[in-house]
Amino acid sequence: MMNVPIVDINSKGKAVGKSEDLVLFVDNAVPGDVADIQITKKKKNYAQGRVIKIQKESKDRVDAFCKHFGICGGCKWQDLDYQAQLKYKEGWIVQNFKKIGGIEVPDILPILGSANTKHYRNKLEFTFTNKKWLTQSQMEHLKADTLPEDHEQNGLGLHLPGKFDKVMDLEECFLQREPSNKIRLAIRDFALEHGLSFFDIREQRGLLRTLIIRTASTGDLMVLLSFFKNDTNNINALLEHLSSEFPEITSLMYVVNSKKNDTITDLKIRPYVGKDHIIEEIDGLKFKVGPKTFFQTNSEQAAELYKIVADFAQIKKKEVVYDLYTGSGTIANYLAKSAKKVVGLEYVPESIENAKENAALNGIDNTTFYAGDMKDLLTDEFVEENGTPDVIVTDPPRSGMHADVVKKIAEMQPNRIVYVSCDSATQARDVALLDQYKVAKMQPVDMFPHTSHVENVALLVKI
């Protein structure tokens, strides 16, 4: 289709084009562009396609800064001006509250952008592959039989969007600060030089599986390698090389994962050199982050997010606060100085242990933490034992809160509810169920520049 105007961008990050009665969803286009599009999938009222040529560039189009842009799924919006990104993210939140929740938001504060739009992540997970994704140019060479016979098929990088078995080998990445790039490349080069096998996800064979790198503002640095089998000699050789080349690594660990999936939450992590954790610091509080710990991946923006939560909550010294879906207790411990007591609840037992350790690390003695399913924990007996909450802070996963949890919150009747969400669609659904409350104000926070993800903080007060 020729000269298709790109008119919008949806909450999944897809550009939206309009042509007669057909709506088109495409990647690598910017609202305001006029583009030629090849249809790849067609339904009755919409189609998916890919851009063949940009005929007219949008005023919001900018040059991407990474050589892998357009293929790698790490950050899809590098070609969209950052201020325009913020405008669309804020718009989706307002739209979701209107369409899904039937809620007109009286006071939505301007979205808080990230001070750093590069190198903002404190955690990245890379995947090894023995069949790396070929670029369009490489594919053309392959069809013409002009690729060199020794063309390297092994790679280490990020999955392509929606493709579990396709991995882009990365030469550079702007998501995490150095020495992340240097470490990834050093591991890949050592493995290639010494003939270590890269994982084949379909055949379930090979040694090298995944790599996790965590950085912290304190200077701590964690590297965790996952191996498919316990090949002691090769594992030790690689880890010893890393330890020697990067003495700044404060926590070097590995795990043997022979399962069919990459999850390591149920596996034993083995320290090689250094501590079994790193320390992150946010607004004067220290947090212990282990290899399995969930922690906000943009530390600088997390600090801003917690300040907003505290400001919305307006906690008084005599008040009891419940922090639902507390994770490793970051928000609970952050709010503790203002409250009589903070009660944190979380499904994952390991996270609750981290939360307790973080409280002890900071000398906080007015937080208590419980592990279990939220809808089962929040009984009348639990409330009687811990006190009726004056304020509830809730930060659920993307799927939002279980209906029974929403019902129990309404029964407890806190004076204020601060709802933090990474998906304003499920947030709007849950807020609509709390019909005894109204949205007093909202503050969107951009934690992930160049992606379609956005956090939103909503303050609910009794009607």
Image (cartoon, rainbow, N blue to C red):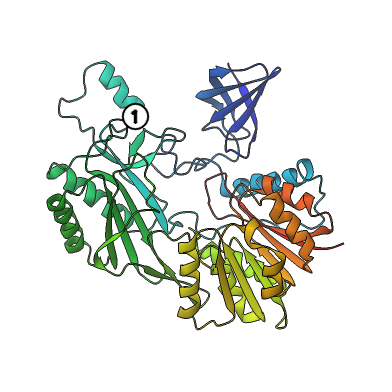
Does residue 40 appear to the left or right of 106 in the view shown?
Answer: left
Residue at the extreme front of the image, as rendered: 381
How crowded pointer 1 is (Cα within 10 Å; few <14, some 14-19, many 20+) is rated as: few
Residue under the image location 75 percent in, 72 percent down: 390
Quarter of the image holding residue 329?
Answer: bottom right
Choose between 65 and 197: the one closer to the eye.
197
Q: Position of residue 3 (x, y in %)?
A: 60, 20
Front in this rendered view, residue 33 or 217: 217
- The residue tagged with tag 1: helix, strand or loop? loop
Q: How many marks?
A: 1
Tell me what residue is drawn at x 68 percent, y 46 percent.
426
Residue 312 showing in the rendered view = no
The residue carrying mark 1 is 135
Rendered-image quadrant of the N terminus:
top right
Identity of the residue drawn at 37% across and 51% down: 264
* Front-lying residue, 43 or 451: 43
Image quadrant assignment for residue 66: top left
Q: Position of residue 115 (x, y in %)?
A: 53, 61
148 left or right of 431 in image: left
Residue 431 locus on image (x, y percent): 75, 52
Q: Does 302 sit above or below residue 228? A: below
Image coordinates for residue 102, horizontal then vertical, percent: 81, 44
Which is more toward the observer, 115 or 209? 209
Above-or-below relation of 352 to 422: below
| Amino acid beneath label 1 | Thr
Q: Is residue 392 above or below residue 255?
A: below
Residue drawn at the location 32% of the way across and 31% of the way down: 202
Q: Is residue 432 left or right of residue 185?
A: right
